[in-house]
């Protein structure tokens, strides 16, 4: 049995130092520095790529905001053209003007629908919906309470968001 006093390996020397194939401290430090440089380079490249992606996304959002109305404006141009044509004909008969107004209204309605702007015009008897309707008054009526009696002004949705609520009168409780 070997006593600690008789152990040939000094206590402060690591066991690996006795292994002749183990890398020296200088070699290990050089390896770690090389690995650090590699990781730092990869980090800087990833950071630059993320910054470029963020910048490209910001540019795309900016362009989308800037030109979002373009499609809608294109849809409205024929309506403007029709109104200008009507003004250019001061000698037109009332029937011609009325026909032109109806045609222009159809153009406008089609342009709004193409751009996902839809009318809110509840039928009488429809349950009052405070998310889409604005009650102007409550009137006595023969129909069920809290239902639409009449539409005073159409409302409009753009996609699923209320652009303007429909102005309605609502049946009073009996």
Image (cartoon, rainbow, N blue to C red):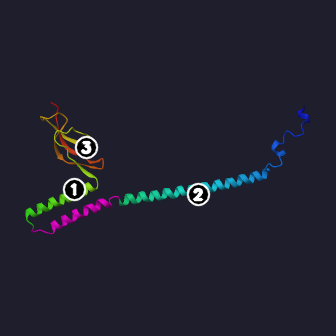
Give neighbour class at mark 2: few <14, some 14-19, many 20+ (Cα, 10 Å): few
From the image, state whether disc 1 or disc 3 is nearer to you: 1
Closer to the chain start, of discs 2 and 3, is 2
Question: Does residue 169 show up?
Answer: yes
Asked if residue 140 is among those painted magenta in the image, a careful observer would answer: no
Of residues 23 and 129, the one nearer the viewer is 23
Q: Position of residue 30 (x, y in %)?
A: 74, 54
Q: Quadrant of the N terminus?
A: top right
Residue 8 vs 174, above or below: the answer is: below
Q: Are marks 1 and 3 in contact (CB under 8 Å)?
A: no
User: CA gap, disc 2 to disc 3?
Assistant: 51 Å
For the C terminus, give its image quadrant. top left
Percent position of residue 34, x then y: 70, 55
Residue 14 in view in this figure: no
Q: Which residue is painted at 60% across and 54% down in the image?
A: 43
Q: CA distance from mark 1 to mark 3?
A: 19 Å
Number of numbered callouts drawn = 3
Helix, strand or loop status at disc 3: loop
Q: Which residue is mark 3?
A: 132
Q: Percent position (x, y) of residue 87?
A: 15, 66
Q: Residue furthest right?
A: 6
Q: Earlier in the sequence, mark 2 or mark 1?
A: 2
Q: Residue 122, located in which quarter of the rendered image?
A: top left
Q: Which residues are magenta?
A: 68-91
Q: Residue at x 75, y 51 (%)?
A: 28
Q: Residue at 60%, 56% (x, y): give it.
A: 44
Residue drawn at x 19%, y 39% is: 126
Say which mark, if any, is on residue 45: 2
C-alpha distance separating marks 2 and 1: 52 Å
The secondary structure that most of the magenta stretch takes on is helix
Q: Is residue 124 left or right of residue 57?
A: left
Q: Which residue does the numbered mark 1 point to in the structure image?
A: 109
């Amino acid at each position: 049995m070997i006593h600690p006093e008789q152990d040939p390996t000094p206590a402060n020397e690591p066991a690996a130092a006795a292994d002749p194939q183990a890398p020296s401290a200088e070699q290990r430090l050089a390896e770690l520095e090389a690995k650090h440089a590699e990781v730092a380079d990869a980090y800087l490249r990833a950071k630059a790529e993320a910054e470029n992606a963020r910048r490209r996304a910001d540019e795309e959002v900016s362009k989308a905001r800037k030109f979002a109305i373009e499609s809608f404006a294109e849809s409205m141009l024929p309506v403007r053209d029709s109104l200008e044509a009507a003004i250019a004909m001061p000698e037109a008969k009332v029937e011609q003007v009325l026909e032109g107004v109806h045609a222009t209204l159809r153009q406008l309605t089609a342009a709004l629908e193409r751009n996902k702007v839809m009318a809110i015009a509840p039928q009488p008897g429809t349950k009052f919906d405070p998310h889409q309707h604005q009650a102007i008054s409550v009137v006595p009526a023969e129909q069920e309470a809290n239902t639409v009696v009449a539409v005073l002004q159409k409302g409009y949705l753009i996609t699923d968001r209320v652009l303007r609520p429909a102005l309605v009168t609502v049946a009073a409780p009996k």
